[in-house]
Amino acid sequence: MNHEILFRDLRDKRFRVGIAGAKGGFSRTLLAALRNVPQLEVAALCDLDTDGVEALLADLGYAPARLCEDAAAVRDVAAPGRPVLLRDHALLDEVPMDIVVEATGQPEIAARIAERAIRRGVHVAMVTKEADSVVGPHLNELAKQNGVVYTTADGDQPANLIGLVTWARLLGFEVVAAGKSSEYDFVFDHADGQVAWTDQRCQAPDLASLWHLGDDVAGTLSRRSAALAALPQRATPDYCEMNVVANSTGLQPSRDELSYPVCRITELADIFIPRDEGGILDRTGVVDVFNVLRRPEEVSFGGGVFVILRCTDRATWELLREKGHVVSRNGRYACVFLPYHLMGLETPLSLLSACGHGRASGSDWQQVEAVMVARADRDFRAGEFLEMGGHHHVMTDATALLLPAREAEGLAPFYLAAHKRLRHDVRKGSILREADLELDGSDLERLRREIRVAVP
């Protein structure tokens, strides 16, 4: 696809962009990208840490934004070429803009910002996957009703994977599985038997003898996982992102806890295939996640995305195997992958598509296909507050699961439960239910109740 031709008709257009959660890492990469896309102009930056945003703008070479504390001030200074800086997200309503990028990471606030933007005719690029997993289909439906676009943002894994899945389907491929690598690689040094995972290290000399998958795929994967038991192998945001992809593509979770095999990129087409053919899947047409295993000198998957396709013409795929593509040992499956996600550096494509062409770069069709839920890791008492925080927006003392929607009736979506108080006691091992939560004042719950969307 030639993107210069695709967006040539917008060469002389100008679109105004608001960014909520402007101090975050995603927003930094987006602001870095926007400097080089003249069709997109920063109209508003919203964040509680306005000093941090000002420092970020200076670091990136932007002129200072005008800090505004009330609606009158916004109206006085908001003009083309004069971005405003806001603490109060409600003031975004006062800024003329074409699209808002929601990147606060706070699900209730994100839903509120997106809804207000849509109702006043502003497109929304949703980066806060925590909100998207709960009410993405509802906001998408609301956007249709109001004649604007609601979309995931290119550069983040959900949008990239939606793009890869839809590319495959348009070309007539059967998508057996689709997924992503978890955030950080397991880097094994054969010389000293040590594995590095971010800044953590552990000894895992047994991995040397498990480097090749062998014929017992499930057994090898189990032993690799055991060898790395000292390191984390599951991450809460992966469930959230696969929830968004499921709702946008119709693919189902492969299993409640997702699979997380520790594997090399070259093994993917032998792993994410049906169990009766030597793989790990009990069903096909699924989303899943893996952990990258590699040597220090080998390239990372870069938090990228993949699809496993069924090979309908063996000769074609044998030819492609000879050219270096990843094809299963039995010749029936192939893996196609994008070994990167560049965060906000790619997002201008989504903004141009929405503002200039009125098209989502993610999916313009969504329904509730899966629900990310929370399993209690200890006994909770009525009145306790369910804390959420950290880099990965985990909920304290709760484990994420991803269920098909038909199995989740009455259960509370994970990020609907976050930052809520319990109405009832919840026993260890139980999955939180909506009835367990105090939901008065929740915009997430109101949107789920007021806007009807399809549930299979």
Image (cartoon, grey):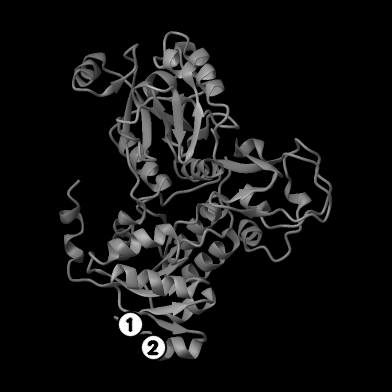
> Reading the chain from its start, which is encountered first: label 1 or label 2?
2
Where does residue 343 sit, x and y in percent of width and height?
Answer: 36, 52
Q: Quadrant of residue 377?
A: top right
Q: Are marks 1 and 2 in contact (CB under 8 Å)?
A: yes
Local crowd at mark 1 within 10 Å, few (<14), some, or many (≥20)? some
Q: Quadrant of residue 312?
A: top left
Look at the picture and state if 109 lies above or below 423. below
From the viewer's perspective, is 429 left or right of 87? right
In this view, the residue in front, 220 or 366, is: 220
Q: Amino acid at mark 1?
A: Arg
Label placed on residue 389: none
Q: Quadrant of residue 268?
A: top left
Look at the picture and state if 276 lies above or below 184. above
Look at the picture and state if 141 lies above or below 454. below
Q: Quadrant of the C terminus?
A: top right
Which residue is under mark 1? 82
Residue occupying the far top of the picture:
215
Residue occupying the far front of the picture:
192
Q: At numbered mark 2, what does the secondary structure look like: helix, strand or loop?
A: helix
From the viewer's perspective, is 366 left or right of 175? right
Q: At numbered mark 1, what does the secondary structure look like: helix, strand or loop?
A: loop
Q: Amino acid at mark 2?
A: Val
Where does residue 379 sit, x and y in percent of width and height?
Answer: 80, 42
Which residue is under mark 2? 77
